[in-house]
Image (cartoon, grey):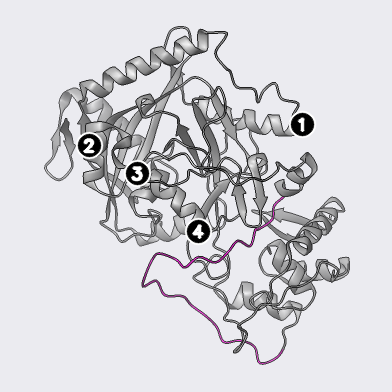
């Protein structure tokens, strides 16, 4: 079932499989940020005749369905969508097809290598024996029901490391990744237009069956910083002007996936490189763009919701079908408004990583001014890219709402942006412009939306610009 073809510790290399090993080493060790920090420790080839037969039959079935004019086909290309929204979907799809190759001569079915992080060797063995349905949990898939994989090996390692990035774990830690072949014919590209809510973020495909006529969903995701007291960074579907950090591929049936290799990847002891990669990701300067796409950004997903979804991707599980909460799809104008860079507040969910210290600073003795609060949040404290925010003043056990009618002037907004040492999220621009402390006060969604419209107008006037979902003076 599993045969070792490479082991760095013993020096073993199967001569017949050397080409496969070298290709896996290149894909993993030469991934963005991985050079000098990740090393392939061992490779096992999966030999399972039953899974091979199921996969071959699945490819034939996909071809027959694609050739059958009576079989339902995807409709997203034919829908009366705005040109921008349709183009966004085409860009996401092109990113997947860029690395795909035909599975049949008729070019009706395509296939490509994908990766799946495993939290243990036992899970990897289970996948090798019986495919990805061997460890099913009733967890709602964020982008639809199916088997979750990724085209990025380093993104798969995040789930192998229990929701920790590869540059965050201790040196010498070993993660396990299953490399598989994925077959697909009709793909539905997921974009931010599929989100039904931003506060908190909610994808309308969560827990749903795949789109009619489609056998897979694909989504480009962007790494977003933690919000308020949360410690863990999360991933969301990219906005059209944001950079792609990874791509998730949701496969409808397990037979459409053929597990091929189990790879052990070791994190090397390289503190300089580790810090370099961490800074690159935190400041949004890292990622891969889809071919023909501008650099892509996204909003923070609440950790509890996103981690429930991500647990499946890391444990080789198939998403179970669940009912989607009834909510009307927002009009195009609302979708375009949400497509602009803006942080969503989300609810606070305690972090699962126990024992992780959180740095805090002493609260100011007096009410902060806009510049003081900005400097404390962005210059003197840990900020969004650190381990925490400033602690609220003593006795501040309640965060009062701020009505949308309390709107600062354009001069106050621009002044706040100029005084800040880093780009500010929409919410913080609003509060700091009013002289309020973002660590104590929360705002209504209507106020946040109104503030976003003001910032958009200032951007059009050349007084502000957006950077990774935040705002700064131009």
Q: Main secondary structure of the magenta part?
A: loop
- Label 4 secondary element: helix
Task: Give the residues in magenta.
Answer: 340-366
> Looking at the rendering, which quadrant does residue 331 occupy?
top right
As rendered, which of 162 and 469 lies closer to the eye?
Answer: 162
- Label 1 secondary element: loop
Q: Residues within 10 Å of mark 3 (few under 14, many from 20)?
A: many
Q: Residue 216, position in %: x, y?
A: 49, 29
Query: Which residue: 82% across, 55% down?
Result: 453
Whether 264 is among the magenta residues is no
> Looking at the rendering, which quadrant does residue 43 occupy?
top left
- Select label 3 or label 4 by which is in front: 4
- Label 3 secondary element: strand
Residue contact between numbered discs 1 and 3, judged by CB atoms under 8 Å: no
Q: Which residue is mark 3?
A: 117
Would you say 140 lies left or right of 420 here?
Answer: left
Q: Residue 248, position in %: x, y?
A: 48, 38
Q: Which residue is mark 1?
A: 82
Q: Which residue is mark 4?
A: 303
Would you say 316 lies left or right of 143 here?
Answer: left
Residue contact between numbered discs 2 and 4, judged by CB atoms under 8 Å: no
Q: Is 432 placed above or below 145 here?
A: below
As rendered, which of 420 and 130 lies closer to the eye?
Answer: 130
> Looking at the rendering, which quadrant does residue 354 occupy?
bottom left
Q: Residue 163, position in %: x, y?
A: 40, 55
The answer for how far apart the CA atoms under marks 2 and 4 are is 33 Å
- Select label 2 or label 4 by which is in front: 4
Q: Residue 441, position in %: x, y?
A: 69, 76
As rendered, which of 312 and 286 lies closer to the eye?
Answer: 312
The answer for how far apart the CA atoms under marks 2 and 3 are is 14 Å
């Amino acid at each position: 079932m599993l045969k070792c073809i490479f082991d760095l510790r013993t020096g073993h290399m199967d001569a017949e499989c050397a080409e496969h090993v070298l290709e896996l080493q290149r894909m993993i060790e030469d991934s963005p940020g991985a050079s000098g920090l990740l090393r392939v420790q061992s490779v096992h080839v999966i030999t399972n005749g039953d899974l091979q037969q199921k996969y071959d039959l699945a490819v034939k079935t996909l071809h027959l369905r694609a050739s059958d004019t009576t079989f339902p086909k995807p409709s997203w290309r034919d829908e009366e969508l705005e040109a921008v929204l349709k183009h966004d979907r085409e860009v996401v799809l092109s990113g997947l097809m860029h690395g795909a190759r035909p599975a049949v001569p008729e070019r009706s079915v395509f296939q490509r290598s994908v990766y799946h992080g495993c939290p243990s060797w036992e899970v990897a063995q289970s996948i090798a024996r019986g495919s990805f349905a061997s460890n099913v949990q009733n967890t709602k898939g964020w982008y639809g029901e199916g088997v979750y994989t990724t085209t990025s090996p380093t993104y798969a390692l995040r789930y192998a490391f229990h929701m920790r990035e590869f540059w965050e774990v201790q040196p010498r830690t070993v993660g396990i990744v299953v490399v598989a072949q994925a077959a697909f014919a009709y793909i539905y590209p997921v974009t931010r237009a599929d989100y039904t809510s931003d506060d908190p973020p909610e994808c309308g495909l969560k827990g749903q069956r795949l789109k009619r006529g489609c056998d897979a969903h694909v989504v480009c995701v962007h790494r977003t910083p933690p919000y308020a007291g949360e410690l863990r960074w999360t991933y969301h579907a990219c906005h059209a002007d944001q950079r792609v950090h990874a791509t998730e591929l949701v496969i409808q049936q397990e037979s459409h996936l053929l597990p091929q290799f189990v790879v052990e990847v070791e994190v090397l002891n390289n503190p300089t490189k580790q810090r370099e990669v961490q800074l690159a990701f935190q400041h949004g300067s890292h990622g891969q763009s889809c071919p023909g796409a501008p650099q892509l950004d996204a909003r923070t997903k609440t950790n509890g919701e996103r981690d429930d979804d991500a647990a499946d991707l890391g444990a080789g599980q198939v998403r179970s079908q669940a009912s989607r909460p009834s909510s009307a799809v927002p009009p195009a104008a609302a979708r375009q408004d949400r497509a602009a860079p803006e942080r969503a507040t989300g609810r606070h969910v305690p972090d699962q990583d126990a024992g992780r210290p959180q740095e805090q600073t002493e609260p100011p003795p007096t009410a902060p001014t806009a510049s003081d609060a900005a400097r404390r949040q962005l210059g003197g404290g840990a900020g969004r890219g650190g381990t925490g925010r400033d602690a609220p003043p003593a006795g501040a056990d309640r965060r009062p709402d701020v009505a949308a009618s309390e709107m600062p002037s354009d001069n106050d907004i621009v002044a706040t942006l100029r005084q800040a040492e880093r780009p500010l999220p929409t919410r913080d621009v609003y509060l700091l412009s009013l002289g309020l402390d973002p660590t104590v006060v929360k705002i209504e969604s209507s106020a946040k939306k109104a503030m976003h419209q003001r910032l958009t107008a200032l951007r059009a006037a050349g007084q502000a610009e957006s950077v990774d979902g935040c705002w700064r003076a131009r």
